């Protein structure tokens, strides 16, 4: 559990080049870890595959321990995918299983793939497909999240055992943390993400019901298009959702495990073979 007597700080990095989003990363840390993590975020921005930024902004904010909400990670698995066509089928099937209609999924993927710059998550009405964050064309940033040491150690140990160090655990962990905060928000039904990194071709679909499902081969290597879509329950309080996603600090204090590689039918209970 988060100790309310311990002072925590939110450290957030954003990097851009000529207004074009390059990189973003963050975490919540105690005071003794501020220096090392700030330097690490700056180095990360300078070495990003999307290019060299002309602007790097680091924000360090002290948090009131009593404001921090504790959450668990979503359980993690990888969908058995061999090519881009199968990945697209998996995205539709998983989101349909989460209650999102095919037309709504198509509209959401069009937002990602039309080349618009999404530095945050686009909020899409799960029934109508309407974009609900019109005042924020770049999307809504999910921010102020971290992980406690015990949960982090569990993740690192299980990840190393399952992958033998072949995958970059930092990239996966950060995506799981972000998706877990999004899923913990009332009114958020599901999420789909395609990375805008040209060298990273694994995306994910996530929800409280599905967990965090990694989707390999979701795009062609070298493609810089990407973004995140949050599907919002019809009639949900958008202002409350945006406030939670942007401003409510959460710490992950429980790791719910990695469940290996799953066939699509195992995740949905539907076997179309």
Image: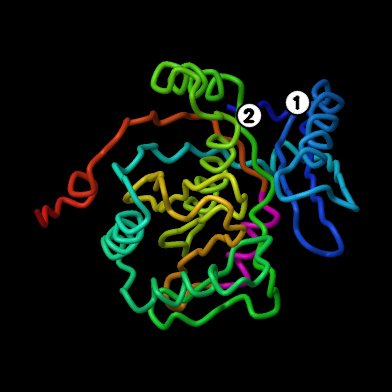
Q: Report x, y in % for residue 273.
A: 9, 53
Q: Are marks 1 and 2 in contact (CB under 8 Å)?
A: yes
Circle 1 crowding by C-alpha within 10 Å: few under 14, some 14–19, many from 20: few
Instruction: Using the rendered view, name the quadrant where residue 260 is placed.
Output: top left
Q: Is residue 114 magenta?
A: no
Which residues lie in the magenta part?
Answer: 238-248
Q: Residue 6 carries which label?
A: 1
Q: Report x, y in % for residue 9.
A: 79, 36
**Nearest the camera: 54 or 148?**
54
Q: In this view, does 121 lie to the left or right of 31?
A: left
**Nearest the camera: 202 or 214?**
202
Residue in the image at 67% along x and 58% along y? 141
Dominant secondary structure (helix, strand or loop) of the stretch shown in magenta = helix
Q: Does the magenta stretch include residue 243?
A: yes
Q: Is residue 181 left or right of residue 146?
A: left
User: What residue sits right under mark 2 in the picture?
Assistant: 2
Q: In this view, does 99 lie above or below 83?
A: below
Q: Report x, y in % for residue 118.
A: 65, 65
Q: Is residue 39 left or right of residue 237?
A: right
């Amino acid at each position: 559990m988060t100790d309310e007597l311990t002072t925590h700080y939110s450290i957030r990095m954003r990097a851009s080049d000529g207004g074009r989003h390059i990189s973003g990363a963050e975490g919540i840390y105690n005071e003794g870890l501020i220096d090392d993590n700030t330097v690490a975020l700056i180095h990360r921005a300078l070495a990003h595959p999307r290019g060299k930024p002309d602007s790097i902004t680091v924000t360090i904010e002290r948090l009131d321990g009593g404001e921090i909400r504790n959450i668990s990670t979503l359980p993690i698995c990888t969908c058995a995918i061999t090519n881009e066509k199968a990945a697209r089928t998996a995205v539709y099937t998983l989101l349909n299983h989460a209650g999102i209609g095919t037309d709504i999924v198509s509209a959401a993927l069009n937002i990602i793939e039309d080349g618009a710059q999404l530095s945050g998550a686009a909020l899409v009405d799960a029934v109508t497909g309407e974009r609900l964050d019109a005042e924020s064309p770049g999307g809504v940033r999910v921010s102020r999240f971290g992980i406690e040491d015990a949960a982090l150690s569990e993740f690192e140990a299980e990840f190393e055992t399952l992958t033998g160090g072949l995958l970059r655990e930092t990239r996966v962990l950060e995506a799981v943390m972000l998706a877990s905060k999004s899923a913990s928000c009332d009114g958020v039904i599901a999420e789909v993400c395609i990375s805008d990194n040209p060298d990273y071709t694994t995306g994910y679909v996530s929800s409280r019901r599905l967990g965090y499902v990694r989707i390999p081969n979701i795009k062609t290597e070298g493609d810089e298009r990407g973004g995140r879509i949050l599907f919002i329950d019809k009639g949900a309080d958008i202002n409350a959702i945006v406030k939670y996603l942007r401003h409510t600090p959460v710490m992950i204090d429980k790791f719910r495990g990695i469940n290996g590689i799953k066939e699509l039918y195992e995740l949905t209970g539907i076997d179309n073979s």
